[in-house]
Image: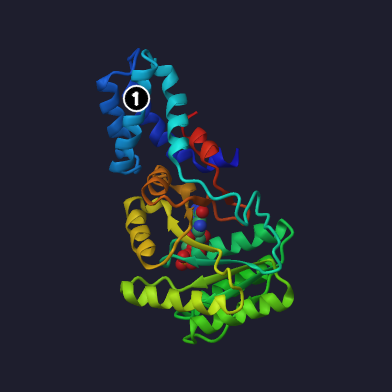
Amino acid sequence: EKLDTGLQKTKEGVWSKITRAVAGKSKIDDEVLDNLEEAFITSDVGVDTTLKIIERIEQRVARDKYVNSEELNNLLCEEISDMLARPDNDGDNLDDFEIKKTGDPYVIMVVGVNGVGKTTTIGKLAAQYKKAGNKVVLGAADTFRAAAIEQLDIWGERVGVPVVKQKMGSDPAAVAFDTLSSAKAQGADVVIIDTAGRLHNKIGLMNELTKIKNVMKRVVPAAPQEILLVLDGSTGQNAFEQARQFVAATEVNALAVTKLDGTAKGGVVIGISDQFKIPVKYIGIGEGLEDLQIFRAEEFVRSLFL
Ligand code: GDP
């Protein structure tokens, strides 16, 4: 229900456009498909993904012969959730923030530009992983801004998890190294590392993230098991551009899309997941500690269309 409320604006936006696309139609014909195409493109799904969806619907209509417009929502749900990238659930993760215990901590390196909700997402993740019974440690490796270190500290205190930090301007890789060493010594289950969100130039970003990754491997060979890119869902097409840049700079293998509660641009989740073949793993649907959910494709698509 929380998901339904959180996605209300997107739902209204997408829903009203689709309703208009099929208004007065008894079957899915070319005109309906054209209108649907427009509805999706203007819902921030993105052109490429929209064309893919339309093609799938066309095929279904051709195969099933007669598809009436009442069946369309079901059809859309099936086809869209089918095309979304899924997390590899044989891996370390996860259902409801449970972690497979390996003796080494599960390390999440969080990347993304400032303002997208990175710190908030880290706080929410810490809270949820802790609630699921994990010992969590945070690392303040965004040493570029004093405010970033302070913010993370505040979240650590609020959630009740330790934050490893150094002073502003210190080497981010050194902070990451300290964090993992400390986490390992404490027998922590989950480590979440904040990184600087500067996109000033690609090589700089790539070098910094590579250095952090390499240093972490000296403590935990499998680290970082998760490179989580945080994107602000309310920025629509901008989020695509940020994803493009971070994917070029490092091996992003999970996405968190935030601020879906305040926007009608939730269709961006579908487009990004499809275009980058990287699973959306978490979605942010509010400012509270509990307002971060594990993304489940069917559930998400159903709450948009049904
Ligand atoms: P950072 O600069 O990327 O670390 O961004 P912050 O974590 O400081 O978040 C920026 C603003 O976005 C804050 O006011 C957060 O409360 C807000 N925010 C983050 N995630 C969400 C979300 O899922 N929903 C809403 N409504 N606001 C969010």
Q: Is residue 174 visible?
A: yes
Say which residue appears at 65% left-offset and 49% top-offset: 95
* Quadrant for the N terminus in the image: top right
Residue 152 image point, x, y percent: 57, 72
Q: Secondary structure at mark 1?
A: helix
Q: How many marks?
A: 1
In this picture the colour scheme is rainbow
User: Dividing the picture into quarters, in which one does residue 45 lie?
Assistant: top left
> Which residue has dot 1 on it?
59
CA neighbours of label 1 inside 10 A, class few (<14), some (14 to 19), many (20+): few
Q: Nearer the viewer, residue 2 or 205?
A: 205
Q: Is residue 27 above or below residue 137?
A: above
> Residue 20: in sight, yes or no?
no
Describe residue 119's horizontal placement relative to residue 64 as left or right. right
- Say which amino acid is labelled 1: Gln
Q: Position of residue 116 (x, y in %)?
A: 44, 61
Judging depth in this view, the residue of 277 and 70 nearest the camera is 277
Q: Position of residue 229 (x, y in %)?
A: 46, 61
- Residue labelled 1 has its Cβ within 8 Å of some atom of ligand 1: no
Q: Position of residue 9 (x, y in %)?
A: 44, 40
Left or right: 13 as drawn, with respect to 134: left
Question: Which residue shows up at 42% across the image and 48% down it?
Answer: 273
- Residue at 59%, 64% (x, y): give it: 123
